[in-house]
Amino acid sequence: MSLKMVILKNLKTQSKVERSSLSYIGLLLLLAFGLQAQDSVSLPVDTFLNIVERHHPMAVKARLIKDRARAQRLKASGSFDPKLFSDVDQKRFKKTDYYTLQNSGLEVPGWFGLKAKAGYELNDGVFLNNQATVPGSGLWYGDISWTLGKGLFLDERRAALKQARILEDAAEFEIDLALNQLFLEALQSYWDWYAAYQELKVYEEALDQAQFRFRSVKQAAIIGDEPFIDTLESAIQVQDREVKLQTARANYIFQSNVLNSFLWMDGQIPMQLQGAVRPAYDYSPLLNILPADWFERHPALNAYQLKIERLDIERRLNQELLKPELTVNYKFLNAPTQNDFFAEYSPDNYSWGLKASFPLFVRKGRGEVMKSKVKIQESELDLELKRIQIQNKVQAYEAELVLMTQQLQSVNQMVANYNRLLEAENIKFRNGESSLFLVNSRELKYIDSRLKQIKTEAKLQLVEAKLKAEAGILFED
């Protein structure tokens, strides 16, 4: 039993969702492994885009943007990780222990310039510095430092974490932009493939008609009902259609190979279109194609906005360079006994310190702030320009889409009218009331109108795709 028959048999007993899944899996098997189907298998554009989204290497790569942003945020968060420390410094010379300094503990970075540290010191030695002298059982301490000047409201650690969070939000918009572009390229290929396939079918039908008329005219000429010169004209028509069919078949093969570049499995296994796979066209009038809030949700504009937010964080960080460096630290000291850890604790046992510095001209800080402001102004100008460009292009595509829809309706009517003329001319020809020249003339007009109809259908779908891509909604997660 063929793959197509298996799928059709299962479709009768499955729900709508299950049928969609079966069709999707069946197409993957057919494309990936070249399984043969007795009947043609339709590849709708939605299924095609589903395959591209799930399996194309660029789609897989685009989703890695989020993983990279998460890794960056994790790295930035690491600046606030508590850490254990242990410092040992010892000097021994000519069998004399000059000094042994030991300092171990836990350091916890905080927010708003706070940093806490708890530790234990044990120092001894013949030439121990008086400042390093501690009780024989060691000295426990708790140290709190607070930056009151530069770094109070923002420092490099907090700036990096804030920017990493913004990058993680921006990753979603970057993915949307990448997949929007990928979908647009894929749809361009799909509708070129569709047009090539339909043109191939038109010329196959035209060749069949030309061969049928040639046989009919030849038989009529043999019995004397038609002049033999008409057989030459019919033969020329057959030859012309054969040449055009060969050209159309070559174009279809080329477009099929282009489409193959978008067909993958798991981003690693390339898939090939099989002879049974055919494009599908589902036309419906296009009204209110864009959601009302498409402009506010546009991924490119939101990405620009987040870029400005990152630059503003950089500006605020540089403004901290204009402040003096002022750090206060307080360390409480405690020498515990064996029975009670806090037995000897007293508020009078402490050490404290103050560090202060300030550059006189602050030229470095002022220069960095100026650079940051210039970057923000440049990005704001880029954002405004991007807004205008997107609005103008969307309006242009909307107008073109309306015109293309009207043009397709006119072309459909034209094709129907040419078809009526051709059928009427064939009836007159069979009744001996017309000539082969008139039939061929009517048929050429009909073929030209069909080719124009096919190109208009493909162009209409492509304009719709360009409109959605420009509005940032061709791919929406």
Image: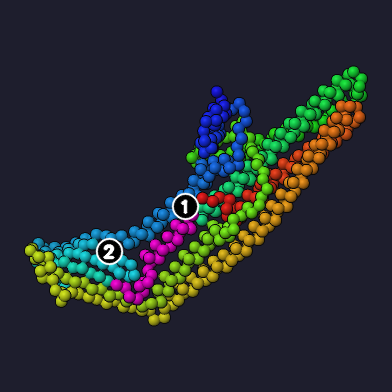
Q: Residue furthest top?
A: 223
Which residue is found at the position 59% from the left and 27% from the top? 37
Q: Residue at x 51, y 52 (%)?
A: 175
Type of residue at label 1? Ile
The residue to which callout 2 is attached is: 108
Q: Quadrant of the N terminus?
A: top right
Instruction: Give how far across and how far down residue 295 sits, in percent.
Output: 58, 60
The structure residue drawn at horizontal position 42% and vertical position 70%, both measured from the top left corner, is 317
- The amino acid at mark 2 is Val
Q: Position of residue 462 (x, y in %)?
A: 66, 48
* Number of numbered discs overlaid on the protein picture: 2
Query: In the rendered image, which residue does mark 1 sit on?
Result: 65
Identify whether 24 is placed above or below 85: above
Q: Based on the picture, tell me whether residue 34 belongs to the magenta stretch.
A: no
Q: Nearer the viewer, residue 221 or 42?
A: 42
Is 18 left, or right, of 78 in this rendering? right
* Residue 59 visible in the current orientation: yes
| Residue numbers of the magenta segment | 146-172
